[in-house]
Image: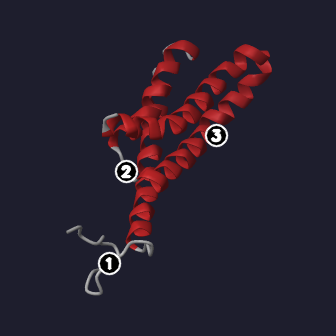
Amino acid sequence: MSPFQQKLLRFFPYVLILFAAVYLTGLAPLIYGENAYYFSNLMLLYGLPAVTGAVSFAYGLKNGFTWYFVLFMPLIFTSTIFVFYGGDTGFFLNVLVYGVFSLVFELVGAALYRKREYYRTDVEREPSQKPGSKKKKK
């Protein structure tokens, strides 16, 4: 398996969580009727940015920064604009907001990932090496 395929398998659970959150938000008014529009609007304003931030932060903390993970939330939400929201152009602003949330929180997680790698203690090092550098193989 190629390294790119391994990375795709690593971020599949995170994308699945984003996919479920976005599609359940869009399906709520269709399943529960008119009363679910309030829930759907709250999820669009507060819930999806929070889920996007949390999932992106967790991915960045676990795997570091990858540019293609940042693109998945806007792509997933763009597909729902035409299906659930009738192609309303106002929702394209949400695509931008969710993309920015994904980028910022993944960068924060990636920064903590790098710091965690820097302070790892289970790697053998020469006394003159910095804590973040690994021992060279001979």
Residue type at numbered disc 3: Gly
Q: Earlier in the sequence, mark 2 or mark 1?
A: 2
- The numbered disc on residue 57 is none
Camera-side mark, 3 or 1: 1
Could you say which quadrant of the image residue 132 lies in?
bottom left
Residue type at numbered disc 2: Phe
Q: Decide which of 20, 52 is in the foreground and name it.
A: 20
Residue holding disc 2? 65
Q: Is residue 44 left or right of residue 131?
A: right
Q: Is residue 70 left or right of residue 14?
A: left
Disc 2 on helix, strand or loop?
A: loop
Disc 3 on helix, strand or loop?
A: helix
Q: Decide which of 130, 52 is in the foreground and name it.
A: 130
> Who's the residue at 30% across and 87% down the image?
127
Judged from this view, the residue extending furthest toward the front is: 138
Could you say which quadrant of the image residue 27 lies in?
top right
Q: Decide which of 66, 49 is in the foreground and name it.
A: 66
Residue holding disc 1? 125
Camera-side mark, 3 or 2: 2
Q: Is residue 39 left or right of residue 119?
A: right
> Who's the residue at 49% across and 34% down the image?
12
Q: On the rendered image, what quadrant is the N terminus found in?
A: top left
Q: Relative to residue 123, is residue 7 depicted above or below?
A: above
Could you say which quadrant of the image residue 131 lies in?
bottom left
Residue holding disc 3? 47
